[in-house]
Amino acid sequence: MNKIYHISDQPCPRLQELPTVTATQLKQSTADVLDQVSAGKPVAITRHDRARVVMISAEQYNELVAQESHVLSELRTEYRTLLDEMQTPEQKAAAKRLFEATPEELGAAAVRGAIRKAKQKS
């Protein structure tokens, strides 16, 4: 499940694409930086030429947290569905056969699977 997270309708920029402000500049122009961030424009705060912190607005933070909760909920549902599918009597029997199989049986099954996969590709 590959999701593209975004703030508002714009894709999230990569860290290296964000406008930067040095820690010293932040100290000297805190109000200006806060105005920029409040306007929905994230800023990377640098120290010794390296991004240390990213400032985002409270609104953007809340959106990210809400998206995270939604994604986690989707993953939880997907996991439970897969787990339920693995709990059927047929799947339990197949798992039991797998764990009780000899190395020769496992090898033969692997060869059959590879042949089946090759046939599907052609």
Image (spheres, grey):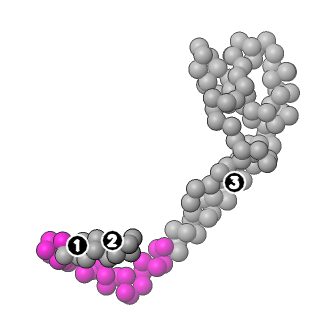
CA gap between label 2 and label 3 equals 40 Å
Q: Which mark is residue 67?
A: 3
Q: Earlier in the sequence, mark 2 or mark 1?
A: 1
CA gap between label 2 and label 1 equals 11 Å
Q: Residue at x 80, y 43 (%)?
A: 59
Q: Earlier in the sequence, mark 3 or mark 1?
A: 3
- Side of 29 relative to 106 (left or right): right
Q: Secondary structure at mark 2?
A: helix
Residue located farthest toward the bottom when viewing the structure as drawn: 89
Q: Earlier in the sequence, mark 2 or mark 3?
A: 3
Q: Quadrant of the N terminus?
A: bottom right
User: In the rendering, at what x and y percent does residue 90 appear?
Assistant: 37, 87
Residue that numbered label 2 is attached to: 118
- Side of 51 relative to 117 (left or right): right
Q: Residues within 10 Å of mark 1 (few under 14, many from 20)?
A: few
Q: Quick check: is 83 in the magenta stretch? A: yes
Q: Quick check: is 77 in the magenta stretch? A: no
The kind of residue tagged 2 is Ala
Residue that numbered label 1 is attached to: 111
| Vertical placement of residue 89 versus 115, above or below | below
Q: Secondary structure at mark 1?
A: helix
Q: Are marks 2 and 1 in contact (CB under 8 Å)?
A: no
- The quarter holding residue 95 reads bottom left
